[in-house]
Image (tube, helix red, strand yellow):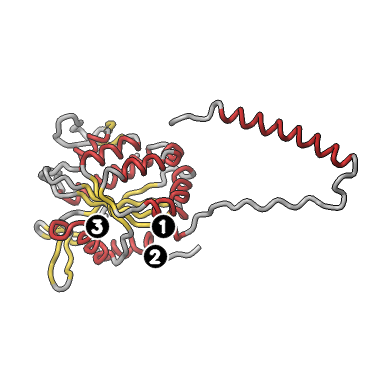
Amino acid sequence: MAKKKKSGRIAVPFLVTVFLGLLIIGGGAYAVYKYFGLGNEQELKEPSPRVVATTSYEDSHTILLVLDEPDLKCSSTFVLMRSIPKDKKLMFLGLPTNMITVIDGAQRSLAGSYKGGGVSAAKEFIEIVFGITIDRYVKFDGKALAKACNMIGGVNYPVKVEMSGFNNDGSEQYLNGEQIEKFITYSMFDEGEVQRAYIASSVISDMINQADGKRLADGLDNSFNTIINMVDSDITAVDYKKRKTAVKNMLSRSESVSRFLTMDGNNADSDFIPSEGFIKNIVEEYFAEKTG
């Protein structure tokens, strides 16, 4: 399963004025109150401490992102997202669709699992390969992906493909949502699915790092409500409410919070065999259980 809106110009000064007025009036009233000796028998109570929401490792979560466009020649696209708000870490790992493993004595691939059993089968395949639990999934079509990318703000990315509307010299260019969708579903990369998986994860990560984190955090509620109604997902409103404060804090208080990883392994004819050492390191760094 890596890379502006102003409001309250009237409200803020108004609230400040009201606050100062109350302070002055309240101070005067309190002085009169003390002068006449009123309330000497009772001391003012200490105000109750304000409860501040904190971020913990319980806010960590793993989501499988899937781009499914049956009309295109390329396979579906799979990116695993791991979010650890406590550590200000957001990781994206592109998964080659020709990745294989042995399940119940039979060789399976990610593409084959998805084709035969949909997202649930793809999740099971990835969970077995990495030995992890994937909490939720989001399946996009082309329209929903382009919408989400445009809401984030697009990305500046070096492109070197023979496609209409793109530079083919490896120079950096701005890509909007529609161009991103076209780019990551390109089926003729020199290194095949491994390169396509790498590009998908790096584009997402760069797009987030290049965006204004505070803007993303401030608009997260609206973005969630818009996107969740355009996609197939098992993320609920309760899931979002439970973790949104931690996610907003991570986005608004961190620079370059996101990173992407390139899947390491070996090609075997048309198949890709992931590296056991790579998987072990990924699990230890991002998925090991933490408390606090």
The residue beneath circle 2 is 288
- Closer to us: 33 or 164: 33
Real-space Cα distance between discs 2 and 1? 11 Å
> In the picture shown, does residue 181 fall above or below 271?
above
What is the residue that sits farthest to the top in this orientation? 10
In this picture, residue 81 sits left or right of residue 51: left
Residue bearing the label numbered 3 = 264
Residue drawn at 19 percent across, 31 percent down = 166
Q: Which sits in the foreground, 278 or 225?
A: 225
Answer above or below: position of 152 versus 53.
Answer: above
The three-letter amino acid code for the residue at tag 2 is Ala
Check disc 3 and give the amino acid type: Asp
Q: Is residue 186 above or below residue 18?
A: below
Residue in front for this viewpoint, 169 or 66: 66
Say which element carries label 2: loop
Crowd around label 3: few <14 · some 14–19 · many ≥20 (10 Å): some
Precedes in sequence: disc 1 or disc 3: 1
Residue 255's disc is none
Q: Neighbour class for label 2 at 10 Å: few (<14), some, many (≥20)? A: few
In which quadrant of the rendered image does the N terminus lie?
Answer: bottom left
Q: Classify mark 1: residues with Cα within 10 Å, few (<14), some (14-19) or many (20+).
A: many
Amino acid on which the number 1 mark rests in the picture = Ser
Q: Which corner quadrant of the image does residue 149 belong to?
A: top left
Among the 4 quarters of the image, the one containing residue 227 = top left
- Separation of disc 1 and disc 3 at Cα? 24 Å
Name which residue lies at 19% across and 36% down.
160
The location of residue 178, given as percent across then percent down, is: 23, 34
Q: Earlier in the sequence, mark 2 or mark 3?
A: 3
Q: Mark 1 points at which residue?
A: 60
Mark toward the viewer: 2 or 3? 2
